[in-house]
Image (cartoon, rainbow, N blue to C red):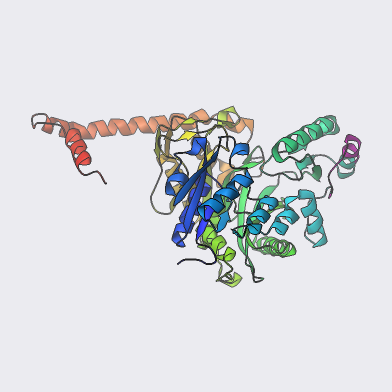
């Protein structure tokens, strides 16, 4: 079908999310415009789009964050809609408004909703007024060190300092006592200023051993709001998610319904339209608190798609085109279990330090109910300028146990050489007794947990060696039979491939 009122979508992003959006647009009969920096000239999203336009140098501040340049490309190419993906300009209300003012459709949350939830302190004020439970703490930014000490003493340690304009773990500091509070406050403000251009920091009571659970919501422009159940995102490093699963393995149905009801209420409180996520901290006693609302499509949206059958990227396109939701809350059911592993170009043994470089060999796993969202291939250069996530492995199973087993199998199939990745780390998590039992919190990853990742790699090397030995054994009869027949089977196979290569 060809959606109205737009037919050509500029995707203001890169990597796997740009590929994801381009695919969704193709299924809806829409043309796409890709934008790219110097280092992304040969990237997958560039090759897949209908049109592609260079927008600047490698640093994001000189390309993907230059809103005026992206808008000009949209005008020059005749794009009549813009999809921001996640990150970069996706939650920039000024850019969203500029797109709308230019007469184009913004495929994202309304600017006023972004503003309402974009400030963490502002969103806490709104949610408190709407009766949504929030973590005890300040509702306004902290201004000086004396105030920080006073508030922390009132709340009680441990506390968490957070950037008001932030996300993705930037500008966050956990503080256990008064001794490190002032230095943590200065550090959080500095990082917040560098990352978001805003040094406002607020404080929350640190909930000990919580789980990070979020509710996916979807709203149209006709007053309809639904939730698509929860995702457990508690496996994190440096306050950033690395493994997500849904549904949450320990969430009672009563708590699920209560949390979902609050999420829908929060969504309505800011007149939201589109796909969004309401995030909560879940305490061990079943209590939960509002954290923030992400006014965009989340990285981990594919696992929700896997258990509900709802294509969230296509839903964004249809809602932006003015269509009402085509299903009701009662139509949605949890079907099976799904796990997502965020594949990063980084070294888990070096505290997940980024590991950019050239990917030499890249082979994605396959088989039933295995999905890989990727923006790379063999020969791709992973640059130093952007987030090191290169792909997402998404696996579905009828049960959680089946899903874990299938994910482990897929991880063993996944092959990436030339750079360090988090693949071995994921296999270690999936073998851990706490994960298998579903009994984990945001403090799951510790330095001790990362110490023996070498065991996982040694196991993989042993498997590869065994496979090579078996292959050599199986080929011995074939080599003997072909020794006098004018050429080996390998050469004949190579000749066939060169003759029958797809054009």
Which x, y percent locates residue 43?
Answer: 46, 41
Q: Is residue 370 above or below residue 189?
A: below
Task: Specify the quadrant of the image occupied by residue 168.
Answer: top right
Looking at the image, residue 191 sits to the left or right of residue 138; the answer is: left
Residue shown at 66% from the left, 58% from the top: 101
Q: Do we see residue 234 in this rendering?
A: no
Looking at the image, residue 336 sits to the left or right of residue 473; the answer is: right
Query: Total marks drawn?
Result: 0
Residue shown at 33% from the left, 32% from the top: 466
On whether residue 143 falls in the magenta region, the answer is: yes
Quadrant location of the N terminus in the rendered image: bottom left
Which one is nearer the viewer's eye here, 246 or 110?
110
- In magenta, the rendered stretch is 139-150
Task: Specify the quadrant of the image occupied by residue 180.
Answer: top right
Looking at the image, residue 291 sits to the left or right of residue 248; the answer is: right
Q: Is residue 319 above or below residue 420?
A: below
Q: Do we see residue 309 in this rendering?
A: yes
Looking at the image, residue 51 sits to the left or right of residue 500; the answer is: right
């Amino acid at each position: 079908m060809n959606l109205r009122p737009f037919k050509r979508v500029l995707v203001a992003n890169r990597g796997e999310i740009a590929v994801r959006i381009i695919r969704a647009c193709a299924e809806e009969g829409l043309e796409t415009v890709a934008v790219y920096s110097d280092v992304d000239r040969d990237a997958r999203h560039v090759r897949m789009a209908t049109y592609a336009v260079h927008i600047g140098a490698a640093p994001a501040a000189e390309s993907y964050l230059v809103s005026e340049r992206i808008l000009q490309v949209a005008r020059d190419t005749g794009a009549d809609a813009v999809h921001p993906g996640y990150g970069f300009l996706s939650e920039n209300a000024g850019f969203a408004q500029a797109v709308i003012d230019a007469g184009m459709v913004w495929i994202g949350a309304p600017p006023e909703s972004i503003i309402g939830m974009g400030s963490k302190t502002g969103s806490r004020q709104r949610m408190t007024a709407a009766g949504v439970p929030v973590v005890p703490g300040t509702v306004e930014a902290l201004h000086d060190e004396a105030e920080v000490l006073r508030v922390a003493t009132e709340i009680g340690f441990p506390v968490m300092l957070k950037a008001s304009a932030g996300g993705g773990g930037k500008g966050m500091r956990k503080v256990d006592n008064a001794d490190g509070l002032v230095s943590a406050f200065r550090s959080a403000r500095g990082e917040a200023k560098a990352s978001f251009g805003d040094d406002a920091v607020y404080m929350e009571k640190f909930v000990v051993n919580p789980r990070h659970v979020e509710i996916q919501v979807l709203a149209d422009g006709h007053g309809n709001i639904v939730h698509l159940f929860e995702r457990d995102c508690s496996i994190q490093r440096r306050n950033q998610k690395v493994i997500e699963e849904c549904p949450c393995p320990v969430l009672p149905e009563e708590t699920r319904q209560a949390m979902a009801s609050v999420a829908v209420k929060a969504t309505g409180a800011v007149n939201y339209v589109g796909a969004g996520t309401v995030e909560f901290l879940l305490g061990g006693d079943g209590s939960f608190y509002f954290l923030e609302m992400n006014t965009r499509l989340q990285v981990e949206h594919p696992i929700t798609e896997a258990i509900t059958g709802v294509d969230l990227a296509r839903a964004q396109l249809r809602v932006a085109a003015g269509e009402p939701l085509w299903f009701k809350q009662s139509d949605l059911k949890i079907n099976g279990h799904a796990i997502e592993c965020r594949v990063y170009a980084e070294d888990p043994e070096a505290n997940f330090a980024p590991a950019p470089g050239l990917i030499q060999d890249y082979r994605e796993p396959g088989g039933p109910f295995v999905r890989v969202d990727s923006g790379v291939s063999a020969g791709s250069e992973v640059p130093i300028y952007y987030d090191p996530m290169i792909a997402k492995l998404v696996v579905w199973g009828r049960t959680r146990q089946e899903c874990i087993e299938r994910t482990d199998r897929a991880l063993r199939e996944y092959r990436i050489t030339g750079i360090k990745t988090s693949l071995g780390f994921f296999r270690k998590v999936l073998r851990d007794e706490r994960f298998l039992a579903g009994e984990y919190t945001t403090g799951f990853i510790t330095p001790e947990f990362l110490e023996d990742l070498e065991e996982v790699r040694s196991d993989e090397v042993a498997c590869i060696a065994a496979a090579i030995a078996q292959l050599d054994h199986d080929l011995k009869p074939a080599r003997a039979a072909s020794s006098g027949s004018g050429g080996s089977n390998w050469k004949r196979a190579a000749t066939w491939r060169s003759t029958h290569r797809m054009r």
